[in-house]
Amino acid sequence: MTAGLEPRLAGKIVLVAGAGSSAAGWSIGKASCVTMARQGAAIVALDSQQEAAEDAAHEVEKAGGSALPVQADVADPAAMQAAVDAALRRYGRIDVLQANAGIGKVGGPEDISLEDWDRIQQVNVTSLLIATRLLAPLMREQGGGAIVTVSSVAGIRYTGYPHLAYSVSKAAVIHFARMAAQQYAADRIRVNTVIPGLIDTPRVAKNVARMFDADARAASAARDRQVPMGRMGTPWEVANAVAFLASDDASYITGTELLVDGGLTGKYA
Ligand SMILES: NC(=O)c1ccc[n+]([C@@H]2O[C@H](COP(=O)([O-])OP(=O)(O)OC[C@H]3O[C@@H](n4cnc5c(N)ncnc54)[C@H](O)[C@@H]3O)[C@@H](O)[C@H]2O)c1
């Protein structure tokens, strides 16, 4: 292959944290694993659920790529250290982190328990601290790297129903990335955030109908109607944005956010 036709992520080792899908089908993490593998990356598919990690790794291999499934809770520093060690044993380096694991629970200030609040912040935000502490020294030594965090429109707008713990955590994800970007710019470690809008993933299909007390098809159609483009996004459309920010095509981009929302955030009411 000529140099100009090299896949965009050729030779990169990418750790996708939250690589699986919480129900059958294509999640953002799983689509990201396959998208980046197709672009030449080897994938460390990390998930708290062993089966989900294996499923993502299997899809990468089916697409002709290389993947290592790893089971770890992103909020557990010892488990994450072990996961990074396993990745290094297999691939020798880590160039990219996609911090994709995210959980939430519907409710406002008077509904959410302190336990749920704490767990959501741990998984969605403290995990960034844990992973960055482990990976930034490694990336610095390697001469650079890229971290892509995954926020949500809920982190910048009220989405029409109370989802306080999740929304606050997703706002923190954006600011964590902005701050880390400043700190690591001189080390050639870029840190950016993808902000997905309403994306059609199995988790959404499973949860949204329950949240709105509607049947799944009606809930899904209601989500489609909210978006100026008339439809939810696909996990692949988010994965493409992640792959771009992870790649050297984004070599002068750090400390910013890329909205993948079909125009939702720019819409008036
Ligand atoms: N689907 C959407 O509409 C949407 C919109 C905006 C943002 N997002 C964000 O995108 C990301 C992926 O969303 P999705 O809909 O594909 O979700 P998903 O639930 O299908 O996938 C998330 C994966 O992360 C794993 N995970 C959860 N907690 C973990 C932990 N503690 N440690 C390691 N892995 C863990 C789950 O097992 C699952 O496999 C999340 O951060 C979510 O908040 C999704």
Image: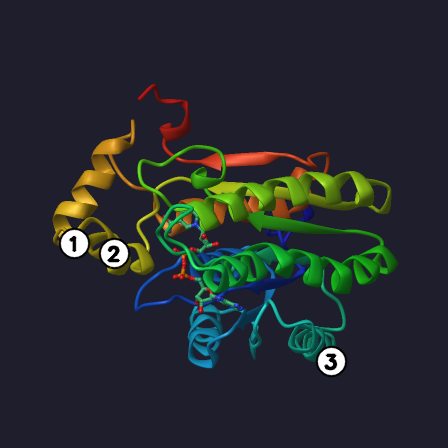
Q: Position of residue 115 (x, y in %)?
A: 49, 64
Task: Give the mark nearer the N terminus: 1 vs 3.
Answer: 3
Q: Position of residue 69 (x, y in %)?
A: 54, 77
Q: CA distance from mark 1 to mark 3?
A: 44 Å
Q: Quadrant of ligand 1?
A: bottom left
Three-letter code for the amino acid on which mark 1 is drawn:
Ala
Task: Give the numbered dot on residue 216.
Answer: 1
Is 49 drawn above or below residue 104 in the view shown? Answer: below
Q: Which quadrant of the rendered structure holds the N terminus?
A: bottom right
**Residue name at image x 36 percent, y 30 percent:** 264
> Mark 2 sits on what residue?
205
Answer whether labels 2 and 1 touch (C-beta < 8 Å). yes
Say what secondary structure mark 3 lies in.
helix
Say what secondary structure mark 1 lies in.
helix
Query: In the rendered view, does 209 fall on the left or right side of 18?
Result: left
Task: Give the numbered dot on residue 103.
Answer: none
Neighbours of disc 3 within 10 Å: few (<14), some (14-19), many (20+)? few
> Mark 3 sits on what residue?
89
Foreground: 2 or 200?
200
Neighbours of disc 2 within 10 Å: few (<14), some (14-19), many (20+)? some
**Residue name at image x 29 percent, y 32 percent:** 227
Mark 3 residue's CB less than 8 Å from ligand 1: no
Neighbours of disc 1 within 10 Å: few (<14), some (14-19), many (20+)? some
**Residue name at image x 33 percent, y 55 percent:** 201
In the image, farthest residue toward the top: 268
Q: CA distance from mark 3 to mark 2?
A: 37 Å
